[in-house]
Amino acid sequence: MIESRIVAGGLDAIAVGDPAAALVVVVLHGRMMAAADLAPFAHSLGTAAYFVFPNGPLPVQPRGYSWWPVDSEMRLREGGARDLHALDPAGRIEARQLLAGLCREVGRGRSVALVGFSQGGMLAMDQALHGARPDALALLSSSRIAFTDWAPRLRCLEGLPVLVAHGRNDEELAFSAGEGLRDAALAGGARVTWVPFEGGHEIPLVVWRALRQFLREKDAAR
């Protein structure tokens, strides 16, 4: 598959596959990660899609990028919280606007599947709930955020295919955070595929297999 560097919606990104493919898959990394960490998986998913892996807008130490400033998240989590449903991070709206611009630019007239890991999953769900619904949504090892804002919006997920995966031994975001995200999607009427796994804050083979099947089903349904 052809791999290139692009700029879309003001974000630097790695693009993999045929730019003319009917399905666009936008994959959002977690905090202190980069597009290059996830881009290799596009080659192994075996899906006829155009994959776009953007870097978050904020460089962070010791490495990688973030979608919003991490200090507010760290303060809350240092207090013992492992489910971030009460967190409303500064920069959430700005990150959502950047993502919306990218999706508009790369997804014109095509189906868009939005995939997010950890912080990227929080942004993906936030995007879906604020008037920029994708055609499919995958939330990997993630959590609800700003739930007082999200809760009244959940019905806009009605009928949307949503994959939620979470590790039972995740020490970064508790397993209950994944269950809460699953339950929120179900409450909104989404068609949820739930993939719990034995592991931590990661994307193991069982999740990539589930994601491959999820995307193939989306591609076949077009």
Image (cartoon, helix red, strand yellow):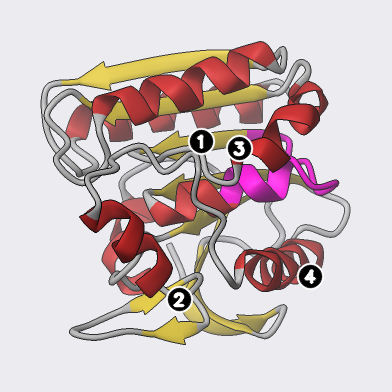
Residue placed under numbered mark 2 in the picture = 69
**Image mark for residue 138:** 1
Do the residues under discs 2 and 3 have CB atoms within 8 angstroms? Answer: no
Along the line of sight, the residue nearer the viewer: 190 or 114: 190
Is residue 71 something one can see in this rendering?
yes
**Magenta part of the protein: which range?**
124-136
Mark 4: give few (<14), some (14-19) or many (20+) Cα within 10 Å. few
Q: Nearer the viewer, mark 2 or mark 1?
A: 2
Going from N to C along the chain, the mark reached first, 1 or 4, is 4
Residue placed under numbered mark 4 in the picture = 105
Percent from the top left, x then y, of residue 24?
A: 65, 51
**Image mark for residue 147:** 3
Going from N to C along the chain, the mark reached first, 4 or 2, is 2
> 35 above or below 27?
below
Disc 2 element: loop
Q: Nearer the viewer, mark 4 or mark 2?
A: 2
